[in-house]
């Protein structure tokens, strides 16, 4: 607490809250972002795994003289 700010002053301060429709719309947007983020993360992980496999394959071929 601030020494010069009483609890009564805090209770008197308005706290803006969006209406329910706006809250729901915001949650839906956040859910959409979460789904997109999850999809991108999955794709990124698959690409990293594929790159790792390619690296192993190239190293194997290089050490066997197949390149």
Image (spheres, grey):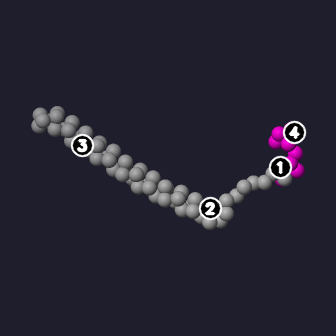
The local crowd at label 3, few if under 14, some if 14 to 19, many if 20 or more residues have their Cα within 10 Å, is few
Q: Which residues are magenta?
A: 1-11
Residue bearing the label numbered 1: 10
Kind of element beneath mark 2: helix
Do the CB atoms of the residues marked 4 and 2 lie less than 8 Å apart? no
Q: Residues within 10 Å of mark 4 (few under 14, many from 20)?
A: few
Indicate which disc, 4 or 3, sits on the residue closer to the N terminus: 4
* Residue at image point 85% right, 42% down: 5
Q: Quadrant of residue 64?
A: top left
Q: Position of residue 18 (x, y in %)?
A: 67, 59
Sequence order check: which comes first, mark 2 or mark 3? Answer: 2
- Count of numbered marks: 4
Can you identify the residue that label 3 sits on?
A: 54
Q: Earlier in the sequence, mark 4 or mark 2?
A: 4
Left or right: where does residue 50 sit relative to residue 19? Answer: left
Q: CA distance from mark 1 to mark 3?
A: 61 Å
Q: Which residue is mark 2?
A: 23
How far apart marks 2 and 3 lie (CA) works out to: 46 Å
Q: Earlier in the sequence, mark 2 or mark 1?
A: 1
């Amino acid at each position: 607490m601030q020494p010069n700010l009483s609890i009564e002053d805090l209770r008197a301060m308005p706290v803006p809250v969006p209406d329910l429709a706006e809250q729901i719309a915001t949650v839906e947007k956040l859910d959409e972002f979460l789904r997109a983020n999850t999809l991108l993360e999955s794709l990124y992980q698959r690409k990293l795994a594929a790159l790792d496999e390619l690296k192993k394959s190239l190293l194997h071929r290089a050490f066997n003289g197949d390149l």
